[in-house]
Amino acid sequence: MSEVVYGRLSRRLLPQMREFCRVNWGGEHPLIHDEKMFDFYYKEGILLNFVVAYTPETDAEVDFLRADKIKLKPIEIQGVCGFIKTNSGEHPDVFISYILTKKGTQFGFALKMIEKVQSLTGARTLSCNNIRKKTRGIYDFLNYTVDDMTQWYRLNDGIENYTLCDIPFPHHEQVRSAEIEAVEVTSPLQLKDFPFSDFSEDLPYKDEGYVTKRYLTYPWHPYLLFRLSDAGRSALIVLREIEWENSRMLRIVDFIGDRSLIKDCGNFIDELLKIRKAEFADWYSFGVTDADMSHAGFSIRYSDDKNILPMYFSPLLMSNVEITIFTNSQDGFMMFRADGDQDRPNLG
């Protein structure tokens, strides 16, 4: 095999890349084959946020009896890796979103593509939300942290019969949160005075552009975005309301800003559950302390739990789901449900 070249995906190679993904993924993937979704997640100006590994175009072996019929051997893609930046800084935090190698290729291709993402972007941290279990070995080899998110939940104690979850053992944790102010954010203008830069040391750091694009102008479904404030502290909490057969639940999908407010959001969540008449709220997270979540009144859903807080609602699939993530950051990193390419619709 010719030497493999690693570089940024070009528009010229995009059709070939899509065919490569169709063949090696085993079908069409919405992130790759839906034009609108691909551009939303991976287009950055004139650039495409994808690394491609390929053997370059070369001269084919010459048949000396037919020297006039020399042909070029075309570019052959060996692997691709898509990524999403959480801010526009010089050293952004980066989510690995999509990684795929040609069937039968060496283990090292995936490692080198991840390394190339880091060198191309100058990434401070690399992480991925919802990895496939069989790929865990790649990230263990890189000495990354690989773990399952924790699913926390808060039941609406005003609901008598739960239809969107199965709760044979209901548990209502006591809320010990302080009373804080919560104001809904519906316009990018309302973010102008939010102190994003104060949280640039948070891992990952999400800036105003990221929040506006990801939550306020998201093309596929609406989000509820609230600004939480208390005694000079500010944070943004993002939720999505999910309905199924005239019942609803709230999914907390992101938290940006002063993390000390996580433990103080319990009364706000209770009030919102009552206002929206939602059966429960759930909150997948990594890096948030058990003490903070318990303080806010959330109960943990264990891997062998008899209580079922489902992930999928279109249609409703009454089963618990584990989400495995990786990060190359050892300390202070938090991940939530909508990070990376997650909490998106499956089109097609």
Image (cartoon, rainbow, N blue to C red):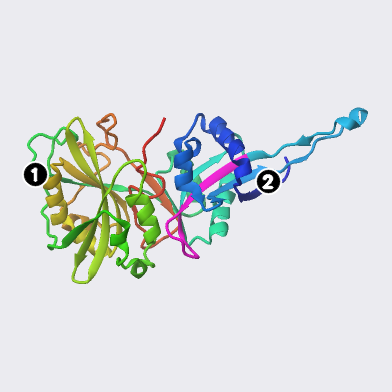
Residue 91 location, x and y as percent?
49, 64
Cα distance, mark 2 to mark 1?
59 Å
Name the quarter where the N terminus is drawn.
top right
Q: Is residue 76 above or below residue 338?
A: above
Residue identified by numbered label 1: 157
Q: In this orientation, which residue lies closer to the viewer: 83 or 287?
A: 83
Q: Is residue 106 visible?
A: no
Q: Residues in magenta?
A: 78-94
Q: Which residue is located at x 12 percent, y 51 percent?
A: 271
Residue 283 location, x and y as percent?
25, 48
Mark 2 or 1, nearer chain start: 2
Q: In this orientation, which residue lies closer to the viewer: 345 or 222?
A: 222
Q: Is residue 169 magenta?
A: no
Q: Amino acid at mark 1?
A: Asp
Q: Is residue 257 left or right of residue 73?
A: left
Q: Which residue is located at x 50 percent, y 35 percent?
A: 33
**Which label number is shown at residue 4?**
2
Q: Which residue is located at x 60 percent, y 44 percent?
A: 11
Residue 213 location, x and y as percent?
38, 52
Q: Amino acid at mark 2?
A: Val
Q: Is residue 35 left or right of residue 113?
A: left
The residue carrying pointer 1 sits among few (fewer than 14), some (14 to 19) or many (20 or more) residues within 10 Å by Cα, namely some
Q: In this orientation, which residue lies closer to the viewer: 161 or 329?
A: 161
Instruction: Kindly state the secondary structure of the residue where label 2 is placed.
Output: loop
Name the quarter where the C terminus is drawn.
top left
Q: Say if mark 2 contacts mark 1, CB within 8 Å.
A: no
Q: Which residue is located at x 40 percent, y 58 percent?
A: 209
Residue 32 location, x and y as percent?
50, 38
Q: Is residue 321 left or right of residue 155?
A: right
Q: Is residue 89 magenta?
A: yes
Instruction: Kindly state the secondary structure of the residue where label 1 is placed.
Output: loop
